[in-house]
Image (tube, coloured by chain):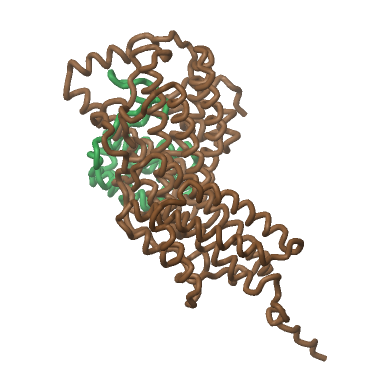
Chain colours: A brown, B green
Amino acid sequence: MNAPVHPDRDKRSGGRWSTPGLVVELLQLAAIERATAHVQAGWLAKISGLDQKLHFATAVESNMSRAAALRQHASRLLERDGTALRAQRGWIAPLRDLDASSDHAEVCAALAGVTGFLLTRYDDLVSRLDPLCDSRLIATLRGARDVLSAQRDAVASRSGAASFAEALRAAAAADDDTVALDEMLWRPVDRVAVPVRPAGRPRPEAGARAHLRSVSRLEPEDIAAELNDNVMAELAAMELLARCSYEHPDLSWSFHASLAAHVSDEARHAAIFRRLMVSRGIDECDLPQHAANYEFAYEFPECAPGSKHELIWRILILCTVLEALAVDKLPVEIATRDWLGQSDIARALDYIAADELFHTENGLRLTRELCKAEHLDPMLERELVHGRFFGRQRNVRARYLQADPERAAREIEIVDSPDPDGIAFVSRTEVELRRRASFTEEECEQVDRWGYNPRSALPRN
Amino acid sequence: MSTQSVAQAFTRLLEDPAYRGLVARNAAELDAWDLDTLERRMLAEEAANGFSSPDIGSGVVMTFLRGAALPPRVASDLGVALNKAHGLPTASFTEPGFVSGSACCPWGHPPVPALGGMLE
C-alpha cells in the first residue's frame, strides 16, 4: 500500500513559519548585505578620505558577517537544501548600478541609505517573528540592529541616502528569475593599480624609504614618521585584500568572510596608529603618504590580470611573506618600545602582533586551497613572487641612489650608523609562532634562506 | 619521482651555464637524471634555446611541471633558480643604502614605488 502524500507545509493556514515568506525574506536580506560588502570592498581603494576608508573596511566585515548569518538561518529553515539558496538579481540591481558610478559622494550617500533600509527591514521582521521559535534569528537581527543604528547615527544626514533606500525597497518588491545566492554578484567593474589618497599630502620621491631613522625613537620627529608609515602600511594591506575579495566574487562566501575579517583588522590597526598620533599631538595632514605594498603587489607580469594566479601571488606575498616577517620582527619592536618606556606604542604593537598570526594562518590556508585548485605549488609560487616583489623594491631604490650620489652617501651613512637608541635586540625567525600559524618546517626553512633574520635558536622537530 | 628529476635537472640548467652548454650540445649529458624520453627531449630543447628571459617561467618544462607534487625544497630551489635567471633577488638586500634584513614588513619601511606603474 502506498504511503499517503504529506500535505504541503507551505500551504498551511498562516504559512509554515511565524511569518509568511520568511525564507525568501532572509535570502533577500542576505543578498543585499552580501552585495553591499562587495561594493564597499571594491570602493575602499577608490575613496580618498581616510575616515571613510576605515568605515568602509569595518563595514565590509559587518555586512559579510550578517549576510553569512542570514544565509545560515535560511539554510537551516530549508533543512540544508543548498539548491534552494537562491536570490533574484533584481534585489541587488541598485547596488550593481551604484558600483558602476564614478561619483564618490553618491556612493557614500547611497551606502548610508542601505543602512537605513536594512534597519527598517530588520525592525519590521523582528516585530513579526515568534519570540520563542525564532529566538536565534531574533538575536541575530537585534545584534545587526545595534551595529546599524550606530552607523546610521553617524551618516544620517547624507543627502541621497533616502532615495537609495527607496530604490532598494522598489527592487525588493520586484519579481524576477532566481539564481544561486552564491552566484548572484557581478564581475568587477574596474581595476585599481594605485589606491586613492587624500589630496594635498606629499608623496615621497620614488625610491625614498618611507621612513629613514636618523634620530632617537624618543624624538617627536621619529615618532611621527614611524606611526604615519605604520598607518600607510595598514591602509595598503587593507585596500589590497579588499580588492582581492572584490575582484573574485566567484569564490566561496567563507573565502570572502576570511578576507573581510582581515580587512577589518587592518582598518582597526590603522585606527590604533592614528589614535596614537592624535594622543601625541601629531597632525597627519602634513605627513607623507603612499601605498607602497599595494602598488608593489597589485599586479605582476607573470600573472594574467584578474587571474587566480594573480590572486594567489597577492595573498602569498602579503600574508605569508610580509605579515609572517612581521611575526618575526614585532617581538623586537615591542621589546624596543618597552625598553624606551613607550608603553602606549608597545601595547598597540602587542594587539597587532596577536592579529598577525591569524592573518598569516589565513593567508596560508587560502593560498593552499587556491594553489590546489589551480595546480600550483605554494613553495614555488612564494619563491617567485618574493623575487618579483623585492626586485621591484630593489630597482626603485637603486635608481633613487644612483640619481643623486651625495644624497645616497648621506643615506648610506645613516643606514650604517649605530642604532640611535643603542637597541641590541635582534629578530629571529619565530619558528614556534610560525608553527602555530600552520607554517611547515620546510616553509620556515624557506624564510631562513632569505636571510631576513638570523636562524631561530629554538629547537626544531 | 620523474617530475622531481625534471625539476632538479631544470634547476641545474638554469643555474649552471656550463652544464647548459653541455646539454645543448649533447643531450646524453642528461642521462644521469631519472628521465624518460619525452622529459629528456624537453630539457634538451630548453637548453638549446638558451632560456630567453621572458619565457623561462612559461616554457615547456615549467608547463610540464605545473601541478606536479614537488618536494618543498625542490620547489623552492627551482623558484630561486628561476628568479636568478630573471635577475630577481633571492634573499634579503645587503647592498649599500639598503637596510639588511629590512624593508620586509611595515616596520622595515620599504622604499616607495614610482607612482602609477612598475618598471620591471
Camera sees residue A374 = no
Q: Work out whether A322 lies above or below B50.
A: above
The x, y position of residue A293, in whole percent, is: 36, 36
Residue A431, position in %: x, y?
Answer: 56, 28
The vertical placement of A50 against B35, above or below, is above
Q: Quadrant of the N terminus of chain A?
A: bottom right
Residue at 50% over, 70% down: A172
Q: In percent of the image, x 31 and y 54: which residue is there?
A: A103
Up-down relation of residue A77 to residue A378 (above or below): below
Left or right of A353, for residue A140: right
Quarter occupied by residue A113: bottom left
Q: Quadrant of the C terminus of chain A?
A: top right
The spot of residue A83 in percent (x, y) is 58, 71
Write the residue at 30% across / 50% down: B59
Residue in front for this viewpoint, A260 or A408: A260
Observer-nearest of A145 and A242: A145
Observer able to see residue A74:
yes
Kindly give the residue lying farthest to the bottom in the view shown.
A1
Residue at the right extreme?
A: A1
Q: Residue A233 in the image: state x and y as whole percent.
A: 40, 33
Q: Nearer the viewer, residue B36 or A422?
A: A422
The image quadrant of residue A459 is top right
Point 59% across, 53% down: residue: A144
Q: How many marks?
A: 0
Give the quadrant of residue B101: top left
Q: Is residue A417 above or below residue A183?
A: above
